[in-house]
Amino acid sequence: MRYATPAGPRRLVAITSEHSVTLAFTFPAAERPGLHGVAIRRDNHDGTTIWLQGLLGFPGSAHTPGEPISSNEGPFQKMYWADYTVREGHTYTYQVIPVYGTPPNQLDVREANALELQVQTGSP
């Protein structure tokens, strides 16, 4: 299934299947200077909230290479991301949040600029 925020310079699109959600996003050119990446938060069907994790931290951070790091501490530095930790037939809400500031210890996760989208995974 395909989901998307309304067309515009800030956009979030999601493609879902039974076991994955792929997110693609863009921010206007005026918001890109100083952008270090994005943090992605997921609200789960059971009421819990998690930060999606990756493996890449900034040089100088306390992060051990190869170990998972929450995206609010080690933002994703791509304009797309896939979540393979979802379950079939569930509803999730994603917030893609731009991250600015000075890595690694003075990151500015700008929640006011978040893109948000609710999706449902497929079921057999």
Image: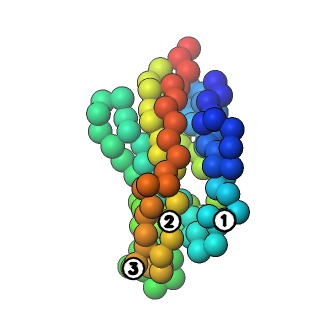
Task: Quadrant for the N terminus, please.
Answer: top right
Residue contact at pointers 2 and 1, CB within 8 angstroms? no
Residue 92: numbered disc = none
Residue 105: numbered disc = 3
Does residue 112 sit above or below 88 in this rendering? below
Name the residue located 50 percent from the left edge and 41 percent from the top edge: 116
Can residue 55 be seen?
no
**Amino acid residing under circle 2:** Val
**Amino acid residing under circle 3:** Asn
What's the distance in space between the residues labelled 3 and 1, CA to CA?
A: 24 Å
**Local secondary structure at mark 3:** loop
Can residue 2 be seen?
yes
Name the residue located 64 percent from the left edge and 56 percent from the top edge: 27
Query: Which residue does the numbered mark 1 point to in the structure image?
Result: 30
Name the residue located 45 percent from the left edge and 36 percent from the top edge: 93
Residue 97 in the image: state x and y as whole percent.
49, 55
**Amino acid residing under circle 1:** Ala
Query: Which residue does the numbered mark 2 point to in the structure image?
Result: 99
**Local secondary structure at mark 1:** helix
**Local secondary structure at mark 2:** strand
